[in-house]
Amino acid sequence: MTNIIGTNGNDSLFGTDDPFSSSGNSDTINGKAGNDTIIGYSGNDTLTGGGGKDQFIFQGYYYNDYSIITDFTGVGKGTNPTAAAIAEVDTLNFQSNSNFTPQNMVLTQNGSNLEITFGAKAGYKIILQNFALENLDNLSKSTGATVDLGNILFYGQTTITDSFDVLNPNSTQSTIFRKNTVTFFNDLNNSVNGFDNSDDVINGQGGDDIIDGKSGNDLLRGGAGNNTLIGGAGNDTLDVEYSTGDNTLNGGTGNDTFSAIGSSGNNLLFGGDGNESLDFSGQDNLYFYSDDFHSTGNNTLYGGAGDDTLNAGGSTGDNLLSGGDGNDSLDIFGLYFSISDMGGESSYDSRPTGNNTLNGGVGDDILIAEGSRGDNLLSGGDGNDSLDVSGSTYSYRYSTESRSTGNNTLNGGTGNDTLTASGSKGDNLLSGGDGNDSLDLSGAFENDYQYKDSRSIGNNTLNGGSGNDTLGASGSTGDNLLDGGTGDDLLRVDYKIATGAIATTFNATTNIGLITAGTSRVNYKSIERLNISGTAFDDNIAGNSGNDTLSGGNGGKDTIDGGKGDDLLRVDYTNATGAITTTFNATNNIGLITAGTSQVNYKNIERLNILGTAFDDNIVGSSGNDTLFGGGGSDTLYGGDGTDTFVFFSYNQGVDSLYDFNATNEVIQVSTDYYGFGGGLSKGSLLASEFTIGTSATTSEQRFIYNSATGKLFFDQDGSGSGFTQVKFAQLDTGLSLTEKNFVVV
């Protein structure tokens, strides 16, 4: 800390300006007598002008700095100050920050001190000790004063401008003084109107105020007390930030913005027609987490027609958005985390605890309630509506918890509706109505951050209605009831991390099925397609009558029955401890796939997608259109009947033998990934110039060479160039009519 003392003359005194100083640059400056210029710079400074007309210059570079002025002299009340008063008037000169404007200025009488801020975006505070609000003013002859005199030079100004008014502390009035200006109330209960066709900035203080901005793009601030703010016509901003009272905000026509950051009262908001935005979150320029930024009251927004937004992240009250027609959004996202590895423990909790409701009406409505601990209801009406109550919890030197714990309901109506409840701990209900609806209950994550269990553990219900619905119950540990309704509905269930084996039942007559795995349970009906991923245990998976996708091979001895329909079996043995061996009986459509200790018995499967091991595999396809990937090692691949795809990730993983490749309609799929084939290949179909039949490449563009006499298939990264020697990666039959059309690049 530096102590700077001036003389009795006209001094220019400068504080320290090192933001990394261990003392924090908190200077004490005393100008003494004379007309002094004092610059505090960074840090929390205490400034004394002494006698005379002193000027205090503020740069506002550093967030969260403040300065205390111990003896600031104001213009005082009235428009005709005395010569003695004029000789002692001090000036605040705000520079270098475009937020230092009359419109952004907020004046707060805190006891005997007046605090001056410029909203959250400026992040700077001036405290005038023992100073009353009514003594702060700017006077101009052009507006009727006897002298040009003032207390504040705002950003970009070189002369005093009469840009704000302060009401008499002992009386009220019905209108503000002038159009297109800034007005500050007193602490009485004021009922004041702005002007029509005027962009008014009106600031309430400690009373219960009624402020009507009339037409124009107005900024109305309620201050303390129970306030009513009426925007009128125009695009208005109504602000009750950090208010402790119960406020009513009516935006009128136009696209209005409501802000209630840190409000602890109950707020009622009427948006009217137009696109309304309401913010309770307190996240703008939040450098340090603090519960002080979050709304704790009950907030209601009646949006009317238009696109309405209520942002109440971290709110602890009950929030209601009746959006009416339009694309409406209610966001109450919250998060909890703690840090316990830094010589102590600290935590931050912004999880909303109230009950939240969005009545959307016609339009695409969104309710985001990640981490919510209350009950959430979205009545979306017609349109593509979305309710997101997903969350997760994980630990890596710190822990976070953002799972929703309440009971969540989405009544979607007509349209394509989505309920995402990943990690939800409450009971979830999606009544989708007409349209293609989606329910996602997917669960845990697996990575190096040691994610804890984030599966949905509540009881979830989906009534899909008409339309093609997609239902996801992966990892959900609750008792789930999923009714797809009419349409072509898909149920996705991923049990890779389940605590027990899958068991399934399906009644083709009633179209009712049951899937269990450990503590997870899904009851379903009217589902046309299944997508099931197995566990590491001995699974018994039965498809239904539709076109199912069933995945085994994650471990254990699995039994899979595709049932009716065109079914696909995916088997991934890339991490197996031994080579693949397969058998398939085309007569009864029964097959067996083994790799090390893993085994899959299957029947009624029309298509296979098999990923091989690092060993020399023997893979036999089915009678359908199979996708076979040998992986590492020199593999033997039989596609069987159907149109098959043979996959190669790289040219150097061994030499695979394709014993029944049909050049008429089958393809070889190669990869362009970093560790893939390279050679400048472009995704899509192979170019004619990139393929040749012969013993080696004859041009620099040729990449794939098929020796028709021997059946060998080579790859050469630079064609006829000398920088790369062609590599054999597959063995085909001889004499095939192979062309570039038999290759696809991904």
Image: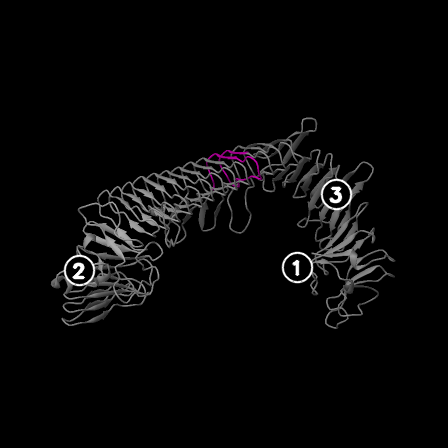
Mark pair 3, 1: CA separation: 26 Å
Mark 2, residue position = 73
- The residues bearing labels 2 and 3 have C-alpha atoms spaced at a distance of 87 Å
Mark with earlier residue (3, 1): 3
Disc number placed over residue 673 in the picture, else none: 1
Judged from the image, the secondary structure of the residue bearing numbered disc 3 is: strand
Counting residues from the N terminus, which is met first, the one under dot 2 or under dot 3? 2
Which quadrant: the C terminus? bottom right
Q: Which mark is residue 50?
A: none
- Residue 523: percent from the left, percent from the top? 60, 31
Q: Give, as a single range, the part of the protein colored magenta.
A: 403-430
Q: Nearer the viewer, mark 2 or mark 1?
A: 2
Label 2: state its secondary structure. Answer: loop
Q: x and y percent of residue 593 in the render?
A: 74, 43
Q: Is residue 46 visible?
A: no
The amino acid marked with disc number 2 is: Thr
